[in-house]
């Protein structure tokens, strides 16, 4: 009988399912942990890395508000609305200008 090592936690299989589903659709996305301070990013796919110019290592553990992508034309009102929606767990449509690592706006 083979030895089973480790434990598959339900939340990990849930995240794996989300990652597989959206990664196969060529989406650009991050996943954050709402149970830790600043809702830290715990996963970003390759598409998101290409979009913003940061490596996965540079993105991990940053706040889900993506403040590292703010630039000169990112409006304070949009930042506040996005933070309120993300940190307050409410759905909201927000238009916000985010920037590539080299300072240009992503396309």
Image (cartoon, rainbow, N blue to C red):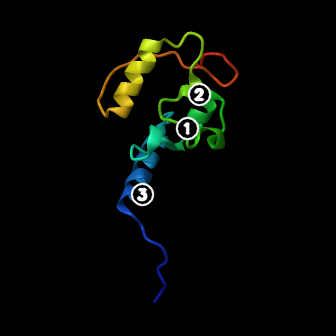
Quadrant the N terminus occupies: bottom left
Number of on-image labels: 3
Q: Position of residue 88 (x, y in %)?
A: 32, 32
- Front one among 47 and 26: 47
Q: Disc 2 and disc 1: Cα gap in Å?
A: 8 Å
Which numbered disc flags the more N-terminal residue, 3 or 1?
A: 3
Q: Residue at x 46, y 38 (%)?
A: 38
Which numbered disc flags the more N-terminal residue, 3 or 2?
A: 3
Task: Pick out the residue farthest to the front.
Answer: 37
Q: Which residue is mark 1?
A: 62
Q: Which residue is mark 2?
A: 68
Q: Residue at x 42, y 13 (%)?
A: 77
Q: Position of residue 37 (x, y in %)?
A: 45, 42
Q: Residue at x 65, y 39 (%)?
A: 58
- Front one among 23 and 99: 99
Labels 3, 2: front one? 2
SS state under label 3:
helix
Q: Disc 3 and disc 1: Cα gap in Å?
A: 20 Å
Q: Disc 3 and disc 2: Cα gap in Å?
A: 27 Å
- Front one among 62 and 94: 62
């Amino acid at each position: 009988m083979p030895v089973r090592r480790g434990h598959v936690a339900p939340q990990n299989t849930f995240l794996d399912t989300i990652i597989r589903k959206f990664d196969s659709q060529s989406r650009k996305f991050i996943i954050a942990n709402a149970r830790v301070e600043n809702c830290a990013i715990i996963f970003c796919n390759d598409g998101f890395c290409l979009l913003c110019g940061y490596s996965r290592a540079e993105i991990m553990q940053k706040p889900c508000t993506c403040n590292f992508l703010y630039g000169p034309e990112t409006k304070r009102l949009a930042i506040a609305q996005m933070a309120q929606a993300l940190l307050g767990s409410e759905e909201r449509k927000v238009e916000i200008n985010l920037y590539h690592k080299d300072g240009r706006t992503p396309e």
